[in-house]
Amino acid sequence: MVKYNRIFKKERCPEMISGKKLKQIRLFRKLTQKELAIMSGLTDAAIRNYELGNRSPNIEQLRKIADALECDISALIDHEPNSIFEIMHIIFDFEKEMKFRPLAGQGEPTALLSHNPHFNDFLVEWDEMRKKHYNGEISDEELEDWKLSFPKKSRFLKKR
């Protein structure tokens, strides 16, 4: 279940946490379970159980973990749409708010445009990071860390 507030922040049910992503981000930050537990005010047993998928944190615990890892809560959530059509309907749902529109050429849609400055900043930065990765300027791990840390480490966020 997903709830959206007026500025598109999602409040997801905690049972959707990804233990795999939690562990991946923790390891990117070079933290032990105990260190993350201390930083987030939880126990190392709780962190271990979240990573193993045995338990799920409540929303407040999830916020504390995300803050300690310097990531957005959404980076810790499993995003598993059932089909490409579900993704398409998400785009439809946000068409007005995000000012999305298809860019069609020769009758074939070739791009998704947005007149939302925050989304445009995201697209620019994502493109830059992909190009850096392609050109060997950053590693696979650095690109993945950027993705998992977005928007906390966004250069556009730091300017605001």
Image: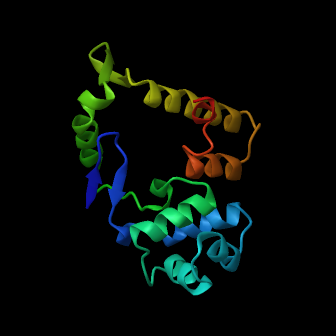
Quarter of the picture holding the C terminus: top right
49 vs 79, left or right, is right
Location of residue 89 by image quarter = top left
Give how far across and how far down residue 54 sits, in percent. Answer: 45, 84
Could you say which quadrant of the image residue 35 lies in? bottom right
Residue sitting at the far top: 106
Q: Nearer the viewer, residue 77 or 152?
A: 152
Q: Quadrant of the N terminus?
A: bottom left
User: Is residue 139 something one can see in this rendering?
Assistant: yes
Is 103 situated left or right of 67 in this image? Answer: left
Q: How many marks?
A: 0
* Relative height, residue 154 to residue 104 (above, below): below
Above/below status of 65 relative to 133: below
Residue appearing at x 59%, y 83% in the figure: 43
Q: Residue at x 37, y 24 (%)?
A: 114
Q: How is the image coloured?
A: rainbow
Residue 76 image position (x, y, % from top left): 49, 61
Q: Is residue 21 visible?
A: no
**65 over 86 or under it: above or below:** below
Looking at this view, is 38 or 152 the one in front?
38
Q: Which quadrant holds residue 45?
A: bottom right
Is 116 displayed left or right of 146 in the figure? Answer: left
Q: Residue at x 53, y 69 (%)?
A: 20
Q: Position of residue 75 (x, y in %)?
A: 50, 55
